[in-house]
Amino acid sequence: MTPDLMEAGAKRRAEHRERAERGSSGDRGAAWGRPVGREPDFAHGVALYLDDVTVSFDGFKALNRLSLSIDVGELRCIIGPNGAGKTTMMDCITGKTRPDAGRISFGSTIDLLRLNEPAIAQIGIGRKFQKPTVYERLTVFENLELSLAADRRVRAALRARLSGAERDRIAEVMALIHLQDEAACSAGLLSHGQKQWLEIGMLLMQDPKLLLLDEPVAGMTDEETERTAELFLSLAGRHSLVVVEHDMHFVEQLTQGRRKVTVLHEGSVLAEGLLSQVQADERVVEVYLGR
């Protein structure tokens, strides 16, 4: 989640709150560019649906009738060769790219194709890009505090007085991401892995229902990778997580022999199942794992 997107999202949340306080009425549906006034419905147990999603760039189909679903609280790993459509898929989910065809739903009630990026962030979908984006001149604590300020102007957020509950929440997240000892440290002085954890913590401060994580352990040490796996496993169940990754050892740590893996190829699902099953699939071996 980039700082400019955070600021735009905070501004939209503030506008929506002002409208609610004025008692404004009207359509509360998921309209393009309008703050969303309802919660997604997860009664059916599915957090995210993609149905026949197609995206073309100059005749090249980045996504080709892609269909998949993510259950509530599920941790799903998405693997596949470069150009398989993994990043384009996340771009479509978060509103960065508009599909040519298909349907994307958050729960059973929210049509994501009718929302823009800040509105999608507002309803509980957070995205972590491969390269960490944090406020390097601010401390770890201040970065998390700024992310907590959902209904305040970003420039005023650091001057606002935190409640005891808010301080407890920041402390809880710092412990979760193993940065409690670096609370007063400038983010720019953190290691690469610690910056990754901090950005994940910034997302968690928004209490997202779905987290999209793009190669989160790229450039990490073995110890940092292991800690990241522990973090994601602790989040599963409380949040739905979609992890795009090339590090197969990390995928093994996350799936633990019992979680589903999806393999993308040429914009479609090539195989899906337990890691051992997709690793034994001749098609996956041919296009991705190698012989």
Image: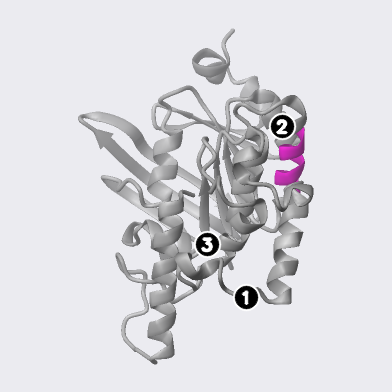
Q: CA distance from mark 3 to mark 2?
A: 26 Å
- Return the residue at label 1: 161
User: Answer yes or no: do the residues labelled 3 and 2 have beta carbons within 8 Å?
Assistant: no
- 122 displayed left or right of 250: left
Mark 3: secondary structure: loop
Q: Which residue is mark 2?
A: 225
The quarter of the image holding the C terminus is top right
Give the CA distance from mark 1 to mark 3: 25 Å
For image coordinates 46% across by 57% down, the residue present is 6
Residue 151 in view here: yes
Q: Which residue is mark 3?
A: 124
Which segment did they paint magenta?
226-234
Q: Is residue 210 above or below residue 155?
A: above
Mark 2 surroundings: few (<14), some (14-19) or many (≥20) residues within 10 A: many
Element class at badge 1? loop
Coordinates of residue 17 in the picture (x, y in percent) = 44, 80
The answer to which of marks 3 and 2 sits earlier in the sequence is 3
Residue type at numbered disc 3? Gly
Above or below residue 188? Residue 287 is: above
For the residues carrying marks 1 and 2, which lies nearer the camera in this image?
1
Disc 1 versus disc 2: distance between alpha carbons? 35 Å
Q: Of residues 78 and 260, which is closer to you in this image?
A: 78
Q: Is residue 97 magenta?
A: no
**Amino acid beneath label 1:** Arg
Tell me which colouring the rendered structure shows. Answer: one colour
Element at badge 2?
helix
State which quadrant residue 145 falls in: bottom right
The residue nearer to you, when weighing 14 against 47, is 14
- Is residue 206 visible from the viewing direction of this image? no
Question: Where residue 29 appears, x then y in whole percent?
Answer: 36, 74
**Residue 65 location (% of width, % of height):** 36, 39
